[in-house]
Image (cartoon, rainbow, N blue to C red):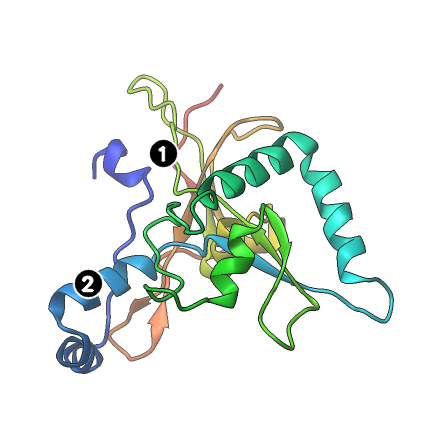
């Protein structure tokens, strides 16, 4: 496999044939293809549940905005206000339609439009804080034919957390390139389970596998 194809984020969702046939008949082939593609991308926002016994929702929002920085907060509010000039939202939400068209108000959509960090407007969920994300972004891996890329392969569960912004910790690492040193930039790949002849699912590597690498 070419390095440019290996080190990229272009996952394909594989369904059980019977399940796929059912959904295609229900949604249509084109709509179901869009659903399958959307499911390979992380959500454009994160939800945080506030323990209102210890802190108020607004206090948590203020702390998050302070952590994220006034610059990002200002950009989010500015883009939100510009979309509201005509009383309609014309912004791009990464291709996902969160609300219905027309004059029907979608509380979740309204929440996301209110800024980078906002309180959920759905009745009964006022203790939920929404944090808007961004992407997908193109990643430059700095591929060099004369210098193999250093790589760390992680478990699927670890990779799912990475897509949500988490760091990689030792328990999630399945394999690693040789000669990786502290401070090195590495590509993070995921070991996805595959069907095995005896039944069930498994990955092709065991914990502690050393990948091919070049000494630095």
Provide the residue designation for mark 2.
33
Provide the residue designation for mark 1.
138
Q: Residue at x 28, y 20 (%)?
A: 145
Q: Report whether residue 158 is seen.
A: no
Q: How many marks?
A: 2
Query: Mark 1: few, some, or many residues within 10 Å (few <14, many ≥20)?
Result: few
Between 48 and 194, the residue placed more toward the observer is 48
Occupied quadrant, residue 83: top left
Q: Residue at x 22, y 80 (%)?
A: 19
Occupied quadrant, residue 50: bottom right
Q: Where is residue 24 drawn, in percent x and y?
A: 15, 75
Q: Which residue is drawn at 47% across and 60% down?
A: 109
Q: Do the CB atoms of the residues marked 1 and 2 lie less than 8 Å apart?
A: no
Residue found at the far front of this picture: 86
Between 36 and 76, the residue placed more toward the observer is 76
Between 196 and 4, the residue placed more toward the observer is 4
Q: Where is residue 127 drawn, in percent x and y?
A: 70, 68
Q: Which residue is drawn at 64% across and 73% down?
A: 125
| Element carrying mark 2 | helix
| Element carrying mark 1 | loop
Q: Residue 51 carries which label?
A: none
- Which circle's residue, 1 or 2, is located before the other in the chain? 2
Q: Where is residue 174 drawn, in percent x and y?
A: 49, 52
Left or right relative to 89: residue 129: right
Q: Quadrant of the N terminus?
A: top left
Query: Mark 2: few, some, or many residues within 10 Å (few <14, many ≥20)?
Result: some
């Amino acid at each position: 496999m070419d390095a440019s194809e290996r080190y990229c984020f272009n996952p394909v969702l594989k369904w059980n044939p019977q399940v796929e046939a059912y959904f295609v008949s229900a949604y249509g082939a084109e709509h179901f293809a869009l659903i399958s593609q959307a499911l390979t991308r992380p959500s454009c926002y994160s939800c945080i549940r506030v323990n209102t016994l210890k802190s108020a929702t607004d206090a948590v929002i203020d702390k998050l905005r302070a952590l994220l920085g006034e610059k990002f907060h200002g950009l989010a509010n500015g883009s939100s206000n510009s979309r509201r000039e005509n009383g309609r939202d014309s912004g791009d939400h990464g291709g996902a339609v969160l609300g219905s068209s027309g004059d029907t108000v979608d509380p979740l959509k309204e929440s996301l439009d209110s800024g980078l960090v906002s309180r959920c407007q759905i009745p009964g969920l006022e203790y939920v804080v929404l944090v808007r994300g961004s992407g997908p972004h193109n990643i430059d891996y700095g591929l060099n034919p004369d210098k193999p890329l250093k790589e760390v392969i992680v478990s699927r569960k670890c990779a799912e957390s990475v897509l949500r912004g988490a760091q990689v910790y030792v328990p999630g690492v399945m394999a690693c390139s040789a000669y990786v040193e502290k401070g090195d930039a590495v590509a993070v790949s995921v070991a996805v389970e595959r069907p095995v002849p005896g039944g069930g699912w498994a990955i092709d590597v065991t914990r502690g596998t050393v990948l091919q690498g070049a000494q630095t």
